[in-house]
Amino acid sequence: MSQTDSYTDMDLLRFTTAGSVDDGKSTLIGRLLYDSKSIFQDQMEAIERASSKMGGDESINLALLTDGLRAEREQGITIDVAYRYFATPKRKFIIADTPGHIQYTRNMVTGASTANLAIILVDARNGLVEQTARHAFIASLLRIPHLVFCINKMDLVDYSEERYEEIRAELEAFCSKLEVNDVRFIPISALKGDNVVHKSKNMDWYEGGTLMYTLETIHISGDQNHVDCRFPVQYVVRPHTDEYHDYRGYAGRVAGGVFKKGDEVMLLPSGFTSKIKSITTFDGELEQAFAPMSVTLCLEDDLDLSRGDMIVRANNQPKAEQEVEVMVCWMSEKPLTPNGKYALKHTTRDARCIVKDIKYKVDINTLHRMEDDKEIKMNDIARISLRTTVPLFFDRYGRNRTTGSLILIDEATNETVGAGMII
């Protein structure tokens, strides 16, 4: 088990932040980075200079740490997905800071698609608003395993426990309609630093952990599907050197399950079976590999496999079908075309597809299905059915986020126009 324990990717937490405009996302991330001492001295000095130019009550504007785009700094809003990396002695982190505006739903879907955890900021003065509902619904749709509601700006409601409990009850009632297993609530003040990295003296009534403690200790190794073995082949390794004359390896990223040396496996679409001879990485051989490790598998038999094929277990196979139903988030300014043809990318497999039917559109604010409105425009979420040119090897998205997701591409422009979750 020592290999799995030392595997560094398991200590990497990907999280996304969302909230309405001016709820304080950028300030919160700035506070996390600043208080956990995760920024360089020259960055600090640049932020101090920029803060003094902009004026303001606070001596330092922490939001500037994350608002990287000039247009964002001028408007004081986030208009793209900004990725930030930082680390503490306990864990590494990648933050996807996503926009709050309704017109940037697609950016939130992009930033949240690989996240283990979503932080949704709620302004303590306003409570549950339309945008909060929208972000919580998208987090649920994307099956983000852990959801943390940060009730921010508690300093503006006099750190009132009564107000916090009121908002918490409201959020709990809304979340009961969603498919999220782990929901948590933390009262904070990003501006003052209460309960972000350090415990708040102003809210001694709150007995839970700080946001940083939650991020460092939340259990994420169980978030991956370690039951269904799925290995989409990305690249066939043939060195053609004297030393490795007959070497044939299949490189890719484990999308589910645990693969061990000596395991019997089945190859899709051929249905042939073989055994795993070796599992290698850049650092040498391994006894086993699991999601989300990138490895090269060598098989005992010389069988024909190419990019887009999949290595699975004979007694546990994904569905292999050409008709799929997906929840799609539309990302293009050009509306979805009924009966339109699109290129499709699913794991490592490229295909083409036709939109057979638009079932309904989702009203993200009420969660109601709109079966009469079939016009799917940018940022809309809808249920559609597709027919593909080749079978896809998939699991439903709720079971495996990797094999259950796909993207649609406009062949004329090569633009990604839709992100789909297979139902």
Image (cartoon, rainbow, N blue to C red):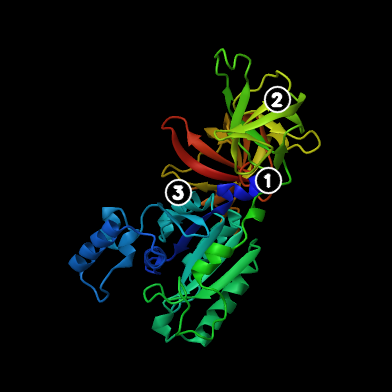
Give the distance between the C-alpha atoms of the residues marked 1 and 3, in whole angstroms.
24 Å
Labelled pair 1, 3 in contact (Cβ < 8 Å): no
Locate residue 293: give its quadrant. Answer: top right
Residue depicted at 68% across the width and 45% down the height: 396
The quarter of the picture where residue 136 lies is: bottom right
Q: What residue is shown at x 47% (from left), y 48% (from top)?
A: 377
Query: Would you name the residue on which mark 3 appears?
Result: 378
Q: Amino acid at mark 3?
A: Met
The residues tagged by marks 2 and 1 sit, at their Cα atoms, a distance apart of 28 Å
- Which amino acid, mark 1? Arg
Q: Nearer the viewer, mark 2 or mark 1?
A: 2
Q: Earlier in the sequence, mark 2 or mark 1?
A: 2
**Mark 3 falls on what kind of element?**
loop
Indicate which disc, 3 or 2, sits on the residue closer to the N terminus.
2
The residue that disc 2 covers is 299
For label 1, the residue is: 396
Looking at the rendered structure, the secondary structure element under dot 2 is strand
Tell me the quarter of the picture where residue 338 sits. top right
Vertically, is 143 above or below 241?
Answer: below
Residue at 43%, 32% (x, y): give it: 414
Q: Is residue 85 left or right of residue 167?
A: left
**Label number found at residue 417:** none
Residue 266 at x, y percent in the picture: 75, 29
Q: Position of residue 236 (x, y in %)?
A: 59, 23
Question: Is label 1 in a helix, a strand or a loop?
Answer: loop
Percent coordinates x, y for residue 208 in the rendering: 57, 77
